[in-house]
Image (tube, grey):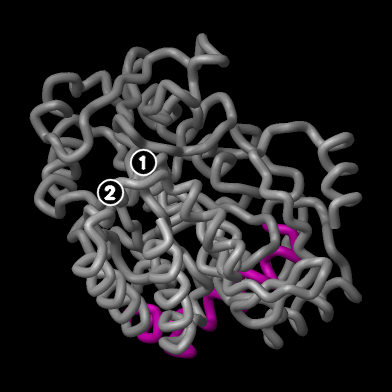
Amino acid sequence: MEQLVNEGEKYIMHTYGRFPLVLEHGEGVYLYDEKGKKYLDMYAGIAVNALGYAHPTLTAALQEQVEKMMHVSNYYYTKNLIEASKLLVENSPFDKVFFCNSGAEANEGALKLAKKYGKLKSEDKVQIIAMKKSFHGRTHGALAVTGQEKYQKSFMPLIPNVSYADYNDIDSLKAIMSDKTCAVILEVIQGEGGIIPGDPAYLQAVEVLCKAHDALLIVDEVQTGIGRTGTLFAFEQFGINPDIVTMAKGLGAGVPIGAMACTSKADVLVPGDHASTFGGNPLVTAAAKVVLKELTANHLLDHVKEVGEYLKGELLKLQKKFDCIKEVRGLGMMLGMELTLPALEVEKKCMDKGMLVVGAGEKVVRFVPPLIIEKAHVDEAIAILQSVLSEM
């Protein structure tokens, strides 16, 4: 393993602070390294591996599709593309879907759609308002609406006409919004910002403001969507209906896919406006079909609610035992534990003891496990956490 890590350091760009760990395969909710050590996965590739590892239905669907064809141009239809689109539309308030490869790309598409919507109304209706402490991706446009200077400062100047409001503060938004605003983009639970849920009354007021100024409401559900919080989309639990939603991560359960869905009101793109060469190809939409069917037809959403509540309850019990735990927050299987300790140190010690977790900021440990996790796995995770926090 040490030789492989050294070669990785030599040949791969240092865009990630990787742990010195080489993972070799997975099964269920466990991963195994090159030496055969077993790890309970409590972050699922950062909310990606929704069905865990080697899921039989997903594996079979991908194997079958590989034997047929993996890619054709979007100048043609495929059955998987149509069926995946139908599943998304029929299980949501949206009317049309565009497939791409990642969450950042989905957000780029949403920004373009919003810009065109605005310019169809007026040439100067181009302002986009994003939230401070948000995260929408690392491509140039997505980075421009990511309200965290630490991600932006080395890449300025970014795209113009972007303003930032304080999250959960409607007066902050009112102060900068006008009829020149074409869109407001936000997360209903800020992920990289520290697992910060939006206040329902605030989010509903944002929707009212958007309607008053004829601006589109874009909800980034790249991390919160596809069952992560116990409903297909998290916004369903906050009493709002956005014009556009973006998604990725769990939609493919491991294969690279993203999507943007919109209502008929926002459906303004025409041929030539936007594209994605690999977007919605037969392989990735085969995976998306499996995930969506598991969520909508096989009661996985009910499982997420039940086990997610159990996980949150067990974390709250830990909070009573350890003063270093300041707060436990989130929904379903997207939970954050804010500490007085460095999250990175907790991550390292958990990894040594056979569990993988990931941070959301310097002091928040994030729990976004495979959606198939059981209560017994939660008990295992809590035992490891208790051991780590006792030592620290």
Q: Are marks 2 and 1 in contact (CB under 8 Å)?
A: yes
Count up the numbered dots.
Answer: 2
Percent position (x, y) of residue 43? 52, 63
Percent position (x, y) of residue 97? 52, 55
Q: Which mark is residue 193?
A: 1
Q: Is residue 58 left or right of residue 148?
A: right
Q: Amino acid at mark 1?
A: Gly
Percent position (x, y) of residue 158? 50, 15
Please tell me whether the stretch drawn in magenta is mainly helix, strand or loop. helix
Residue on which the image places disc 2: 196
Residue displayed at 59% across by 53% down: 258
Residue displayed at 76% across by 66% down: 283
- Tell me if residue 316 comes above or below residue 267 in the rendering: below
**Residue 274 shows up from this direction:** yes
Query: Which image quadrant for residue 145?
Result: top left
Question: What is the span of residues highlighted in magenta in the rendered image?
Answer: 280-305
- Tell me if residue 157 comes above or below residue 85 in the rendering: above
Q: Is residue 381 left or right of residue 60?
A: left
Q: Is residue 23 magenta?
A: no
Q: Residues within 10 Å of mark 2 (few under 14, many from 20)?
A: many
